[in-house]
Each structure stands twice: as structure tokens, then as C-alpha cells.
């Protein structure tokens, strides 16, 4: 039969440790974000509980009594042990947690449909995804890997090229049955052009590669992100300028069609950025090896789709 522990008030013990470490009730109050009076009350409660004076007031502040100094060493050692144990548990959990930051459309249309394959290989890794168009700041954000689009992919051991950008117009099969022709790129002038506000150069880039004149690539419907534009094209609102990697499965299934064979390959590419201090961890290496292999396979398949032309 266990006996009830005779523990002092733990809030009072915490206030004592901070006051003893600072030798100041004022600085202790600031560190604990409470009033100086609250610190004094905690110390009085603890002194009453241990039945011994822990501080004496001196000019300019306080100092520990002999009993207080002895108790401080015990308390400090105990709190250090509690902190070490908690950090060990936290670190143990972090070893299985992989934090990713990547653009929303890349996440929804490329990564998420493939994640089940990664999970099948590494069921013990807990993948957590944050979407943003901003590149991760590893000095300020708790992120292991960042995926971002870059005109000139950065070099160095902390970055790896992932996927190139290949542009082509796509539409829903039903759009081809509405009576408006879509046999040549010039016929795009008869249709609503869809695009993302974050990618205003995509339509002009493809139209220039196709030699189309008189068509304003940014005169159609614009959406906050490309994922919304892809949904709009599925709903037959018009023709979207897409990235091949993001519509490959839709083209295979017939959910979308590419009316023209021309693809425009840009200088931009998606890249992996690694947290400098976590790059060699097992979970980061496992994900990097997997996603790089997926990207290589994706690019290999895209090379057999339509006519390729550098923009």
C-alpha cells in the first residue's frame, strides 16, 4: 500500500528556486510574470511549510540563509532532473516527427496523393504538413524540410533540386463539346483562361512558346492559388495553364485533357531545403530519399508526354 507523498506547494517551490537563483524577489517576479507581492507570499508559504527561514533581507535585496542555501541545492538538482527527463521524452517524440513546409498546390496535387507510399515504407514517421508560399526560415520556424519554387535553385548541401516546371493548357473533356473550337493555340482567344494570382507569368510563357499573338494570358479568371484554378477547370469554367506534374493523373484518367501537345519547360524548379542541424537525421534522410526518387520517376514519365520546348 503506497503512502501519500508529503510534497510542499510546488508553485511555492518554483518561486523559491527563481528567487534563490536571482537573489531578488523583484527579478523573480519579472521572470515568473507575477507581482513581487506574489513571490513574497509564495516564499512565506514555503517557509511555513518547511518550518525554517529561507531568506534574510539585506541592504539592496535578499540572501539565502544556511537552511535556504541547503534547500536550494536540493531543489535545483531536482528541477534539473525533471527538466532533463522532460527534454529526453520530447526529443524522443521529435525523432519520429517530420515537419514539412510547402506550397499549398504542390501539397494537394502532388505530395498528398503519394504520401501513402511513404507511410507504407516508414509507418513510424509522423509527417506534419504546413502550407505556405513563403520559404521556411529555419532560424525561426520549427521545420525540418521546406519545399519551394525557385527561378535559380540555390546550391549547397542544404538544398536539392526536386522537380522542374513544365507548363501546358488543360481542360475538362466536356468543354470540348460546347461548340467552341479548341484545335489550335489561337483558338484560346475564344475561351476563358484560368490561372493563379501567384503565377501571372505561366500563360504568357506558354503562349509565347506556342507563337500565339493577340491573346492576353491574364485576362481570364484568376484564383488565390493554383489549386482553386485546377478545381475550376474540372468544373468546366475554362482552360487552365497547368504544371504537368500536377495534372498527370488527371490526364491519365481522362478527367482532364490536353488539347495541344506543346509543353513549355521553364527555368523554375521545385527544391528541397533542409534544416542545417537536422539534415542528417534518419527521418529527414528517409523522406529526402523517397521524395527524390518519386520526383525522378515523375520527370522520367513527363519526358514522353507531348512536344517539349524551353520557354
Image (tube, helix red, strand yellow):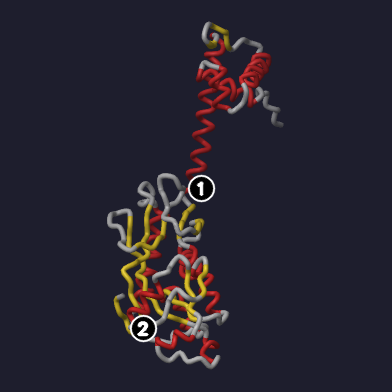
Dot 2 corresponds to which residue? 212
Residue annotated with mark 1: 93
Judge whether 215 appears above or below 274 on screen.
below
Looking at the rendered structure, the secondary structure element under dot 2 is: loop
The residue drawn where x is 52% and y is 9% is 60
* Label 2 CA crowd tier, 10 Å (few <14, some 14–19, many 20+): some
Describe residue 229's horizontal placement relative to residue 297 as left or right.
right
Is residue 261 depicted above or below 286 in this figure?
Answer: below
Residue at 50% of width from left, 85% of height from top? 254
Q: Is residue 164 left or right of residue 57?
A: left
Give the position of the C terminus as an image quadrant: bottom left
Q: Position of residue 170 (x, y in %)?
A: 46, 81
Q: Which sits in the foreground, 151 or 186?
A: 186
Report whether 186 appears left or right of 5: left
The x, y position of residue 168, in whole percent, is 40, 79
- Name the outermost residue toward the front: 214
Amino acid at each position: 500500500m503506497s503512502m501519500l507523498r508529503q510534497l510542499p506547494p510546488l508553485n511555492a517551490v518554483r518561486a523559491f528556486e527563481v528567487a534563490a537563483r536571482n537573489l531578488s524577489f523583484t527579478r523573480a517576479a519579472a521572470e515568473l510574470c507575477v507581482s513581487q507581492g506574489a513571490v513574497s507570499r509564495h516564499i512565506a508559504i514555503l517557509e511555513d511549510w518547511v518550518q525554517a527561514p529561507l531568506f534574510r533581507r539585506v541592504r539592496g535585496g535578499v540572501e539565502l540563509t544556511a537552511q535556504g542555501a541547503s534547500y536550494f541545492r536540493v531543489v535545483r538538482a531536482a528541477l534539473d532532473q525533471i527538466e532533463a527527463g522532460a527534454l529526453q521524452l520530447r526529443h524522443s517524440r521529435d525523432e519520429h516527427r517530420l515537419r514539412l513546409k510547402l506550397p499549398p498546390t504542390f501539397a494537394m496535387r502532388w505530395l498528398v496523393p503519394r504520401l501513402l507510399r511513404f507511410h507504407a515504407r516508414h509507418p513510424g514517421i509522423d509527417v506534419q504538413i504546413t502550407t505556405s508560399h513563403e520559404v521556411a526560415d529555419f532560424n525561426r520556424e520549427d521545420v525540418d524540410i521546406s519545399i519551394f519554387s525557385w527561378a535559380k535553385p540555390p546550391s549547397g548541401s542544404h538544398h536539392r533540386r526536386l522537380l522542374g516546371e513544365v507548363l501546358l493548357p488543360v481542360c475538362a473533356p466536356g468543354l470540348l463539346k460546347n461548340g467552341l473550337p479548341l484545335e489550335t493555340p489561337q483558338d484560346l482567344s475564344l475561351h476563358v483562361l484560368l490561372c493563379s494570382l501567384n503565377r501571372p507569368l505561366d500563360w504568357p510563357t506558354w503562349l509565347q512558346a506556342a507563337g500565339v499573338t493577340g491573346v492576353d494570358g491574364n485576362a481570364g479568371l484568376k484564383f488565390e492559388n493554383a489549386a482553386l484554378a485546377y478545381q475550376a477547370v474540372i468544373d468546366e469554367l475554362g482552360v487552365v495553364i497547368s504544371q504537368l506534374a500536377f495534372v498527370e493523373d488527371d490526364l491519365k484518367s481522362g478527367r482532364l485533357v490536353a488539347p495541344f501537345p506543346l509543353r513549355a519547360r521553364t527555368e523554375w524548379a521545385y527544391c528541397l531545403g533542409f534544416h542545417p542541424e537536422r539534415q542528417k537525421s534518419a527521418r529527414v534522410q528517409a523522406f529526402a530519399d523517397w521524395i527524390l526518387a518519386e520526383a525522378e520517376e515523375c520527370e522520367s514519365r513527363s519526358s514522353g508526354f507531348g512536344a517539349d520546348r524551353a520557354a
